[in-house]
Amino acid sequence: MHVVVPAGGSGTRLWPLSRASNPKFLHPLTGTRNSLLEATFARLEPLATADRVYVVTGSAHSAGVARQLPSLPVENILVEPSARDSCPAIALAAAVIAQRDPDAIMASFAADHLIRDTAVFDRVVGKAVEGAEQGYLMTIGITPTRPETGYGYLRCSEPVENDRLQRVLEFKEKPSLDVATRYVDSGKYLWNASMFVWRVSRFLDELTARRPDVAGPVLEIAASWDTEDRDEVLQRLWPTIPKVAVEYAVMEPAAEDGLVATVPGDFGWSDIGDFETLAEVLGTEVTDSVISIAVAGGTEAGDDRQIVSVDSSDVVVLPSRGRAVALVGVKDLIVVDTEDAVLVCKRDRVQDIKKVISGLRENNAERFI
């Protein structure tokens, strides 16, 4: 099996900890000194040798990827000239793999996810490979632990059972809380974590049929990838490819045609998508209702002495090393202190942090992005 790791991101949802030039997958958010990317690469070792792992990333991040993954062959770092969303990135990797191994099965796992139970993960991936061998476009669905409005959902053909392959009838995008509650209570929905397994030839055939505007230039680029014409072809064609997610381009319409199947997974998955999730993973209690997020390079794990709380409650704090954070009479906040920027946000507005980036651009403050 070949494994693709899309490693993109603009550093918006975890700003100011994460930045455009230093997105979250390069940060140690695993509870150890390892970055999310390093943890992902280590998790893939039982599934594929290093020469069969590909990282698709932007030019601003390629040096960081190479530095953190010294055993990854440099020719397996596929550099996008610009971000075009997930479908062109994954399609480029699939097409390059198809040039080298036309009958290959490929899996795609994001660089910035955290998985606690790797043994269960390996078993679920194995079941997904079986589905790919049968001709399905496979997705690994995450067993929901709560009604969550920030994730997409997969509607399954039957009630969910762990490790049981079944067809995906529909992709449902981020629902309201009432709708998400109904989904979870029904037992027929899984979270979509954008984990995919398929035979590269099958995926490229479906992409060509459904989105020739993506497939055409990607296949031409891949045909030149191992030649001296690569840079010229890449620079000429890549900007012509539409920005589109792989779910919209292929998986959603293919599901309507009965071509998508899933295997439920319950292996301690987190996408660490915002500071609330980060607090769940890395938080340590300062008082009964104040949580400190300890990350390498910031506070030492368990060192909450630089946080002082006076009559404050339900606050999540990520303090900078060596500086005190004092909370007086506040509640329901997220406070993030970094060397050059401070974020103060209501806890129910974490999805709006990305709007800060637009404001910084409008103020000609790109140096903070």
Image: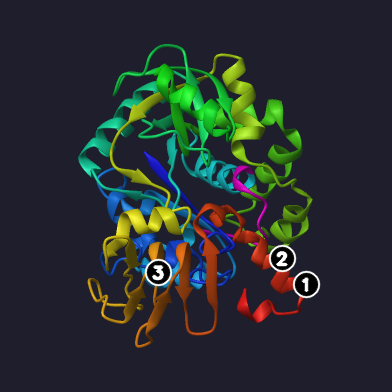
Tell me the quarter of the image containing the N terminus.
top left
For discs 3 and 2, the disc positioned in front in the rendered view: 3
Measured as percent of width and height from the top left, residue 312 is found at: 39, 67
What's the amino acid at mark 3? Answer: Val
Q: Residues within 10 Å of mark 3 (few under 14, many from 20)?
A: many
Measured as percent of width and height from the top left, residue 243 is found at: 71, 47
Measured as percent of width and height from the top left, residue 251 is found at: 58, 28
Task: Identify the mark at residue 37; answer none if there is no mark.
Answer: none
Is residue 297 covered in magenta? no
For discs 3 and 1, the disc positioned in front in the rendered view: 3
* Range shown magenta: 78-87
- Does the rendering let one see residue 136? no
Q: Secondary structure at mark 1?
A: helix
Q: Residue at x 45, y 49 (%)?
A: 110
Residue named by callout 2: 358
What's the amino acid at mark 1? Answer: Glu
Q: Are marks 3 and 1 in contact (CB under 8 Å)?
A: no
Is residue 84 covered in magenta? yes
- Does the rendering let one see residue 142? yes
For residue 239, side relative to residue 321 (left or right): right
Tell me the quarter of the image containing the C terminus.
bottom right
Measured as percent of width and height from the top left, residue 157 is found at: 46, 12
Residue named by callout 1: 362
Instruction: Give the answer, above or below, for where 304 lies relative to 152.
Output: below
Instruction: Give the answer, above or below, for where 333 lies relative to 139.
Output: below
What's the amino acid at mark 2? Answer: Ser
Q: Earlier in the sequence, mark 3 or mark 1?
A: 3
Task: Out of 163 and 152, give the one closest to the viewer.
Answer: 152
Task: Identify the mark at residue 317; answer none if there is no mark.
Answer: 3
Q: Are marks 2 and 1 in contact (CB under 8 Å)?
A: yes
Q: Residues within 10 Å of mark 2 (few under 14, many from 20)?
A: some
Q: Residue at x 67, y 45 (%)?
A: 218
